[in-house]
Amino acid sequence: MLWDISKTFFKIGITCWGGPAIVAQIKKEIVDKKKWINEEEFKETLGFCQMFPGPIAVQTSAHIGYRLRGVVGSFFAFCFYTLPTFIFMLLFSYLYFKFEKVPSFINLFGYLEAVIVAIIIDAIWSMRKIAAPNFKGALLILLCGAAFIIKAPVILVLFSSGLLGFLLFYKKGESTPFLKFEFRTLAKKAVFPFLAFISLLAVFIFAYKISPVLGELGFRMAKVNLLAFGGGYTAVALMFQESVLSTKWLTQSEFINGLALGQITPGPVIITATFIGWKIGGLWGALLATVAVLSPSYLILVFLSSFFKEISAIPFVKYFTTGLLCAFIGMRFQLLIYISSSGLINFLSIVLAAVGVVLLRLKFSPIFLVVLSLILSYFF
């Protein structure tokens, strides 16, 4: 089972772009193809993970792994999903800072964003039944989408959507179960997250002893992770503050180029942290930054996943997370507009996006579309 988990999440990590689209692809692989969990369980997972900071696709992968094989399954899903994007960004960072040929390299991916537009549209369509089973759900999704489009504060939209989810979906008469946690059980389930957190802290301190800049890098990227509510672009804004404005580690143009690499790299855009780490400390800096920007929220998730059933049984939590799920779907419309504005640059890109939607609905692999975009970029 662990081998299957590793293969499946590695495949997702190497073939999917854009957090919301990746989550939809996770659903296709885990729910529709593998049938490891059902749609209701996937909905519970997605709503539960939305409560935490960090990349939603990473958290969703980790929690599904936990549901399948406990802490070990969670660790394998987390590692193998993030491994491909880390390797790609490591290679791109080396090319950028060693040869400074990234601008010409990026041109090769000129039509990739059109493919991403198609993937996002397909993701919205495939998730519609889970997020909007009735008129209330659809209305909440539209309201959240509008709020994100006008750039309302992310945390405010998420919190408001959660409250509205409770008010709209709560059924009168549902009782709240009495939750009882034994200290011995609590301590046992906290062992792995606690030891991992202590180890992570020790790594940061050790890095600081070797180089104060490396230690600071670790703590600042962990801060980005713990404050990154609302998806990857929240993390990007935080990384800009930490690496450009506050520390001057990168110039603005370097950061923009790093972000471009993060966008053409499969997996979460938060992997831009690898690029920042390479600039500061080479391979070890890249590894430290990557671990720091992914691990803290993962450890929180693993600890609370131990009490998933108890927490999810509370009516307020259940319907609050349903509201959060609607907000997450609404966020896709914002992402669609953001990518479309820069990806649909001419008639050919629009045609490619339209054809891509049709091919995805016909069950073609996203890999086929990515290769097609590379060919078009090379010749046109």
Image (cartoon, rainbow, N blue to C red):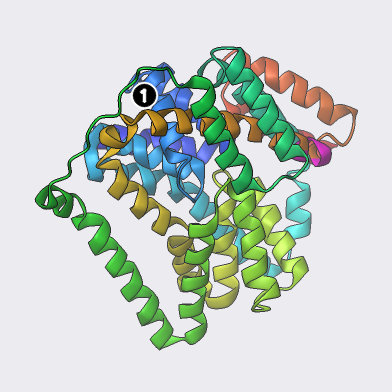
Taking the spot 69% from the left edge, 15% from the top edge, the residue there is 358
Q: Nearer the viewer, residue 52 or 370?
A: 52
- Horizontally, residue 298 falls left or right of residue 176, namely right
What is the quadrant of residue 237 in the picture?
bottom right
**What residue does disc 1 label?**
41
**x%, y% of residue 60?**
43, 38
Taking the spot 62% from the left edge, 62% from the top edge, the residue there is 238
Q: Quadrant of the C terminus?
A: top right
Amino acid type for the residue under numbered disc 1: Glu
Report whether residue 144 is seen. yes
Magenta stretch: includes residue 179: no
Q: Which residues are magenta?
A: 338-342
Does 223 sit above or below residue 33? below
Q: Nearer the viewer, residue 251 or 109?
A: 251
Taking the spot 34% from the left edge, 20% from the top edge, the residue there is 174
For this orientation, the residue located farthest to the right is 346
**x%, y% of residue 190?**
21, 54
Q: Nearer the viewer, residue 278 or 272?
A: 272
Taking the spot 34% from the left edge, 72% from the top edge, the residue there is 201
SS state under label 1: helix
Does 139 sit above or below residue 335? above
Report whether residue 373 is seen. no
Does 147 sit above or below residue 255? above
- Horizontally, residue 206 falls left or right of residue 102, namely left
**x%, y% of residue 333?**
70, 31
- Main secondary structure type of the part rendered in magenta: helix
Does 109 sit above or below residue 253? above
Q: Quadrant of the N terminus?
A: top left
